[in-house]
Image (spheres, rainbow, N blue to C red):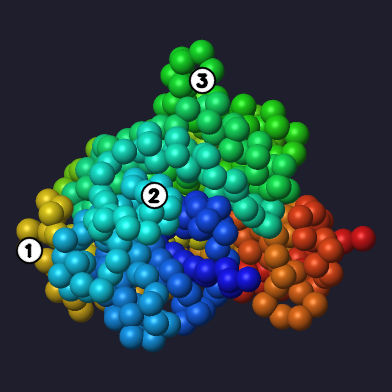
Amino acid sequence: MNKAKSFFIKSFGCQMNVYDSNKMKDIFVSHGMQSTNYYQDADYIVLNTCHIREKATEKTYSDLGRVHKKGKNDHKIIVAGCVAQAEGELIQQRAPYVDLVLGPQSLQLLDTYLSDKNSNLKTMTEFDAIDKFDTLKRFKSHTDSKSSFVTIQEGCDKFCTFCVVPYTRGSEYSRSIPDIIEEVKKLSELGVIEVTLLGQNVNAYHGPDVSGKERGLSYLINKISELDKIKRITYSTSHPNNMTDDLIELHGTNSKLMSCLHLPVQSGSNKILKLMNRKHTREFYFEVIDKLRKHKSNIALSSDFIVGFPEEDDKDFQDTMDLIHHVGFMNSYSFKYSPRPGTPAADREQIPLKIQDDRLKIMQTTLDQQQIDFNKKFLSKRLDVLISSSGKFKGQVKGKSEFNQSVAIPGNPNIIGDIVPVQITDISVHSLIGKAEV
Ligand code: 5AD
Ligand code: SF4
């Protein structure tokens, strides 16, 4: 009997790429192939790439060179994701050995490619979200995880001046509610009890319900909560301008909604927010946070920040630091501004790297301290933890609290999938240690 062919997928960047990688996995499995963790053994190597910052993009090319050289004979290389979308032609020039280039909304064509040995597919970068989701739902999902991502919305119409997403993922598209419910139901039958609803602008979600009536994110979340097997729901990434009152109120009324929210503000300076085309002020962001805390006083907030955006001076940076102190975050991501070709801010005069580095260091020290302070509050306290996998060390399992903190405890893998009451005994910046309460 012939040995089954194998595939290796490496996912870069955001959670939406992780979702897409899982879907590509389902397609490979439907062709009788097996997953391998080693690209050296793989017949098909997929790099699912990220274009958000220059560093991420360059990583694609260095990885491509390596897998091409060290992969086994006759392997096929597929570049998927946002670099594929943005640089399709360039990839073929810089890495002519690449067999297939698939943009994020063309990844369903992987099935066509695998079905037809003589396929002449080469560079597929159409924007067709409808076809993508319609095709993908034909493939059986495979997961042994208790927690799953579900993309409900794709693309962005906001055009922040630093961001490539509107160009790589296209304009906003919301999947229909019946489609999403069907996918979540199938996942719950496979054992999934926690879902993270994904979209580049997830809270701008506006999909049709069974009768074709357009509904927002809060309606969808309530519908998903009606599924008994689903115990926890969260969503990412949101824009402050789409935090509608009904969604804010839901944080106080829907007990399945996790007590955390990722709400990127990028900058605390009104001048920079304007130059970024964020279309809101710092005062508006504070108002949203105040309203959220009125409905859910202990909600854990996280954000993304960009330092060194063109024209950011010391006062602007101080405004951002002031916003960070004012709000208090549990966990945040901060980046140096990276000019992206084709975006409006890329042509502006850039801030010297040394200034960017210094500002980033100051910001990250403060954000880490805030995370430690947040975690410290839970020392000796009880947290319900959804145990999702084995831990880093033998005899350990780990999972997430309702505040999205990573928690590790001594325990047997047979409790994976349970929500376990845990007493917190130790903390670090990025995780908590505890023991199961008996
Ligand atoms: N430079 C630096 N950071 C960026 N991000 C998006 N585009 C850029 C860029 N050009 C950051 C934003 C966004 C996160 C996903 O990546 O903070 O929220
Ligand atoms: Fe990019 Fe988010 Fe702005 Fe859309 S809202 S352009 S995805 S940063």
Residue at (28%, 59%) from the top-left corner? 101
Residue at (66%, 72%) from the top-left corner? 427
| Residue named by callout 2 | 112
The percent coordinates of residue 164 (x first, y second) are 24, 53
- Residue 52 visible somewhere in the drawing: no
Which one is nearer the viewer's eye here, 221 or 175? Answer: 175
Q: In the rendered structure, which disc, 1 or 2, sits on the residue that comes first in sequence?
A: 2
Q: Quadrant of the N terminus?
A: bottom right
Q: Quadrant of the C terminus?
A: bottom right
Secondary structure under tag 2 reads helix
| Residue named by callout 3 | 209
Mark pair 1, 2: CA separation: 45 Å
Which one is nearer the viewer's eye here, 52 or 180? Answer: 180
Quarter of image, res 342: bottom left
Mark pair 2, 3: CA separation: 31 Å
Which mark identifies residue 349? 1
Which one is nearer the viewer's eye here, 113 or 177? Answer: 113
Q: Is residue 138 above or below residue 305?
A: above
Residue at (45%, 39%) from the top-left corner? 135
Mark pair 3, 1: CA separation: 47 Å
Which mark identifies residue 120? none
Q: Is residue 374 above or below residue 356?
A: above
Residue at (55%, 53%) from the top-left corner? 30
